[in-house]
Amino acid sequence: MKKLLALVLSVALALGVAPFAFAEGETFELALVTDIGTIDDKSFNQGAWEGLVQYAEENNLSHKYYQPLEKSTDAYLDQIELAVNAGAKVIVTPGFLFEEPIYIAQDMYPDVHFILLDGEPHNADYSEYRTNENVAAILYAEDQSGFLAGYAVVKGGYTNLGFMGGMAVPAVIRFGYGFLQGAEYAAKEMGIEEITVNYHYTGSFDATPEAQTLASGWYNDGVEVIFGCGGSVGNSVMAAAEAMENKWVVGVDKDQSVESETVITSATKGLAASVYQTLQQFYAGEFPGAQTTVKDASNEGVALPMETTKIEGFTQEDYDALYALLANGEITLLKDTDATSAAELPLEIVKVTVIE
C-alpha cells in the first residue's frame, strides 16, 4: 500500500494534480470511484456523485471520490483499495468498465458493499458472471430513454438527424438504437416519408477537435439535431452547434440544458436517484445484494426532463402518453443484442448512414 501511495503521489506531483488528498487517519464512510471521465463531466460520473453527496449530506456522513490515473482494471482496483483503507463502507462505481474490477473486489473486500452502475460483475474473459451479496448491480433501459428523445425531435419537425456516440459499449448502443426506433415511431405516427440519420461512434468519451469537426461537417450538410451520446463527446457536439444558427443537440445521462443553449432535450437516466435509493436500502438493512436491478420507465428510471425540453410540437401530453406505453410494456424495442449494427435494424422510414 505504501508503494502504491508513493507512486500515485509522485505521478500526481509530476502532472501538477492531486487525485486525492486527505489527512493521515482521516476516514470516509461513502466513496465513489470515477471511470475514465471526471467528477464534473456533466454526465455519468457527476450524476452518480450527486446522488451520493445528497444522501451523505442529509445524513451527515463523510464522503469522498477517487479518480483513477488511467483506464485499467489495476488502476480501478488501486482506487478501490484506497477507498477501503480510508474506511469506506459503501463504494459506488459508475460504468461498465468496473465490471471486472468489481468481480475481483467483491471477493477481496467481503465486508465492503459496492453499487455498480451500468454493469454486472464478470471475469476477464466473460466466462463467468457473478454478483456477490455485497454487490448491487444496476442497469438502465437506455433504449427507452433514447426512444423518447428520438420520438420528441421528430415530433418537433426535425427530419435530418445525427447520432454521435462515444465508445460502442452496450449502454451507448442501446441509446442509439432507441433513438432510431423513436424517430421511426414518430415518423409513422405523423405520416413522414423519410428521416435521415448519420450514425457514428468516436471510440472514446472525450471531447476532441476531431469530434467537433465531424459534428460541424454534419451540421453544414444539413443535419439539424445531433444526439451527443458519450460523456464529453456531447461537449464537442455542443461546441459545433453553438458556432452555427438553428442547430441543436440532445444531451445524455442527465439534464444537460445548463451546458448549452443548443441542448433541446436530454435522454436521461436516474443516476442520482439510483445511488440515493440504494444507499437508503443499505442503511435500512435492505441492501439488494446479489441482484441486478433494471431501471426503466416502469420505475421511472429513464426520462426526458420536460421542464427544460424546448421542442415545439412536443407537449407534456405527448410525453406522458408515450411514457405510459413504455411503462406498461406496450412498446417493445430492439437492443444491442438484437443487431450488430444500426444499419441492421428493421427500419422503414429512418435511413441510417453508418460512418465508421
Image (cartoon, rainbow, N blue to C red):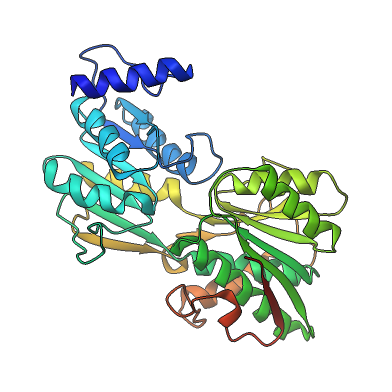
Residue visible at 62% across and 42% down in the picture: 207
Which residue lies most toward the right here? Answer: 245
User: Would you identify the image quadrant in which residue 224 lies?
Assistant: bottom right
**219 to the left or right of 8:** right
**197 to the left or right of 172:** right
- Where residue 70 appears, as percent x and y from the top left, is 40, 37
Q: Is residue 272 above or below residue 4?
A: below
Q: Is residue 261 visible?
A: no
Front in this rendered view, residue 247 or 285 = 247
- Where residue 141 appears, as percent x and y from the top left, is 45, 66
Front in this rendered view, residue 246 or 239 = 239
Q: Is residue 68 above or below residue 185?
A: above
Residue visible at 30% across and 53% down in the picture: 99
Front in this rendered view, residue 35 or 147 = 35
Q: Is residue 257 above or below residue 89?
A: below
Residue visible at 62% across and 65% down in the picture: 356
Q: Is residue 31 above or below residue 228?
A: above
Q: The N terminus appears in which quarter of the rendering? A: top left
- Where residue 213 appears, as percent x and y from the top left, is 75, 49
Q: Is residue 282 visible?
A: yes
Please tell me how many numbered marks the rendered image carries: 0
- Where residue 269 appears, as percent x and y from the top left, is 49, 55
**81 to the left or right of 144:** left
**332 to the left or right of 106:** right
Residue visible at 24% across and 45% down in the picture: 114
